[in-house]
Image (cartoon, grey):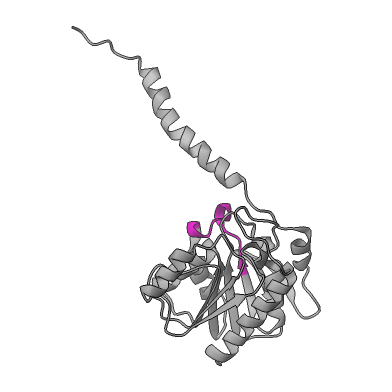
Amino acid sequence: MKRIKKPMHRILIAALGLIIIPAASMLLYFAVYYHATDSAEAALEGSAGVTVTSVDEGYLFDGYGDDAALIFYPGAKVEADAYAPLMLKIAEQGTDCFLCSMPLNFALFDKDRARRMADKYDYDRWVLAGHSLGGAAAAILAESRTQHWDGLVLLAAYPTAELREPTLSVYGSEDTVLNRDKYEEAESLNYWSDETTEIVIQGGNHAQFGDYGIQKGDGEASIPAEQQQDETAEAIARFIEEKIPE
């Protein structure tokens, strides 16, 4: 019995469908993301002590400090601008901040960005930081040992391999997005640095490290976002002063 040959154009259409449909689904997935609030956009205007400028990789929050800088990776599907209030508060306490804008708002798509940024600017001490999946991406870069980092700050995040740098871990008591099982597993596997400081912000949740509204699956915070960010900025300032001396 002879087999009936399918027309070539039908084969091509079917093949294109296998490529186009997944690609379209992926683009649709990343097209929906958390946007910065108006208050976050206002923080990009800077303050009396901090000048905010646009750079190739995102924004520079330039305060009165001149020897230490922090590079920050946003959480997954969160607009980078949403973290402007937190960066402003950190810069006002003496550490310049670079807020990274990521491809499709996904830090894992360019986790080496901080390394390239550090090559462009002249600071004596570099702190790598990130929120949620952005923190995971920062930890992966630190774990790669491709560059020395003086410290690492993880906000509602955890490492997936051994860290060596002095590390600050901060999360909110009402955070129901952070995978606590994975967080504790990282502890049991000794992934956290021997010089790890853990801070739990009472009443804080997952989303309030930034200003982008309510995050799906998150717990309800009992403190305002500004208080959570104030406490976070103060914890980071203490960490840099005590664990990463000049």
Region rendered in magenta? 99-109
Find out whether residue 28 is within the magenta segment.
no
Vertical arrangement, residue 66 with respect to residue 152, above or below:
below
**Which sits in the foreground, 105 or 192?**
192
The count of marks equals 0
Q: How far from the left and from the top, in percent, is residue 183?
A: 46, 68
- Residue 174 as seen in the image, left or right of residue 85: left
* Furthest residue in direction right, as rendered: 48
- Residue 91 as seen in the image, left or right of residue 151: right
**In the rendered view of the protein, which quadrant contains the N terminus?**
top left
Q: How far from the left and from the top, in percent, is residue 124?
A: 55, 86
Find out whether residue 102 is within the magenta segment.
yes
Q: Residue 215's image quarter?
A: bottom right
* Furthest residue in direction top, as rendered: 1
The residue depicted at 45 percent of the width and 64 percent of the height is 181
Q: Is residue 112 visible?
A: no
Q: Is residue 196 visible?
A: yes
The residue depicted at 67 percent of the width and 65 percent of the height is 208
**Which sits in the foreground, 102 or 157?**
157
**In the rendered view of the protein, which quadrant contains the C terminus?**
bottom right
Vertical arrangement, residue 198 with respect to residue 207, above or below:
below
The residue depicted at 81 percent of the width and 79 percent of the height is 48
- Residue 220 as seen in the image, left or right of residue 179: right
Q: How far from the left and from the top, in percent, is residue 3?
A: 23, 11
Vertical arrangement, residue 60 with respect to residue 49, above or below:
above
* Furthest residue in direction left, as rendered: 1
**Which sits in the foreground, 139 or 117?**
139
Q: How far from the left and from the top, in percent, is residue 138?
A: 49, 68
Q: Residue 176's image quarter?
A: bottom right
